[in-house]
Image: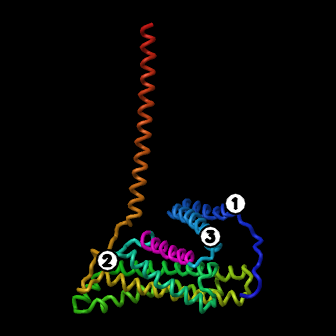
Amino acid sequence: MDGPPAEDSTHLTWANVALGFSFILFNAVISTSLNLGVGSSLVTSALRCIIQLAIMGLLLQRVFETNNPWGVAGIAFLLNFMGTIEAVANKSKKRFHNMFTLVLLSMLGSTIPVSIIGTRYAMAVEPFWKPPQYIPIVGMLCGNTVSGIVVAVAYVLKEIYDNRDKVEMYLAFGASRFEACTPIAREALRLALTPTINQMSVIGIISIPGMMTGAILGGSSVAQAAKLQMIIMFMISASAALASIVTTVSTLATVVDNEHRVRPDRVVVREHAVWRARDWLVSGAVGGIKAAGWTIFSCCRRKTRGENGHGETERLLG
């Protein structure tokens, strides 16, 4: 990149973050006033954003200081692991057997090779694992890959579980599971890749992306920042496409078995175990608080009654 890095003349504090958070509170107030039902989701997501970025900032600072390839590898795996949790536990209303393992493998198999090849050869970074360059790239690839995986899996499971009559008709007329599932796979991949395609089509004219802005603020020329953003977008597209294809094929292979039978019993529609455990803990805590409060109230009531009865007895006895 051209030019010396610009000095960081802006020092942000938690007061600045609180001022930015006020925008979320403003949106939450509007949501509550209009009964949109997204106010709590906005606040919860914003709080998650603050906690996650604060923790990630501490971790990345240590990794940047040590400049250790194993630390970079650990952060890359952590990003993929957390992205898998987000895709399976939080974003997917329907899941299938062994989904966590398959999604994790598809993410690792797409983000890691694409990030290594792209960083080393397309971006000409030597060594490729330099923390300031490699870790942000892996993070961007993971974020966009999760979106593609969620869209593809959601469509496939919806078609297999809710609208499986068409697939079963194809299978009943002698079609193989590949022939019966090909239209579903095509539509799932089309939906999964549409956001990335739309993003590439408007980038630079309608929107200036964050990576390009960061490079400009870091002291690079606008031309170099634009070329860097082009490479990043192509890497994102390749990673999302590869992960979506692998996940779509894995999902179809799970819910339509080797005997060419649709297996809705392999689709899980209830909430993930993480959220069921959360609800159980919350209900238990609330029940415990209510029981403790009722116990304290009963003790105070009995004590008050005892004191009043004892005083009345003393007055009657003179």
Helix or strand or loop: what does disc 3 sit on? helix
Which class describes the residues within 10 Å of circle 1: few (<14), some (14-19), or many (20+)? few
Which class describes the residues within 10 Å of circle 2: few (<14), some (14-19), or many (20+)? many
Report the side of 72 relative to 103 (left or right).
Answer: right
Alpha carbons under labels 2 and 1: distance apart: 49 Å
Q: Nearer the viewer, mark 2 or mark 1?
A: 1
- Range shown magenta: 70-89
Alpha carbons under labels 1 and 3: distance apart: 24 Å
Please state the horizontal and vertical placement of residue 158, each as a whole percent of the image. 36, 78
Which comes before the other along the chain, label 2 or label 1?
Answer: 1
Q: Residue 148 has which mark? A: none
Place residue 134 in its image quadrant.
bottom right
Q: Residue 161 has which mark? A: 2
Nearest to the observer: residue 317 or residue 206: 317
**Three-letter amino acid code at the position of disc 2:** Tyr
Q: For mark 1, what is the residue? A: 15
Q: For mark 3, what is the residue? A: 62
Please state the horizontal and vertical placement of residue 86, each as a whole percent of the image. 47, 71
Helix or strand or loop: what does disc 2 sit on? helix
Nearest to the observer: residue 225 or residue 75: 75
Report the side of 63 relative to 111 (left or right).
Answer: right
Helix or strand or loop: what does disc 1 sit on? helix
The answer to the question of whether label 1 and label 3 lie on touching residues, with beta carbons closer than 8 A, is no
Residue in the picture at 45% in, 26% down: 304
Residue in the picture at 54% in, 81% down: 141
Nearest to the observer: residue 73 or residue 123: 73
Please state the horizontal and vertical placement of residue 120, each as a whole percent of the image. 59, 89
Residue in the picture at 57% in, 89% down: 118
Place residue 281 in its image quadrant.
bottom left
Place residue 226 in its image quadrant.
bottom right
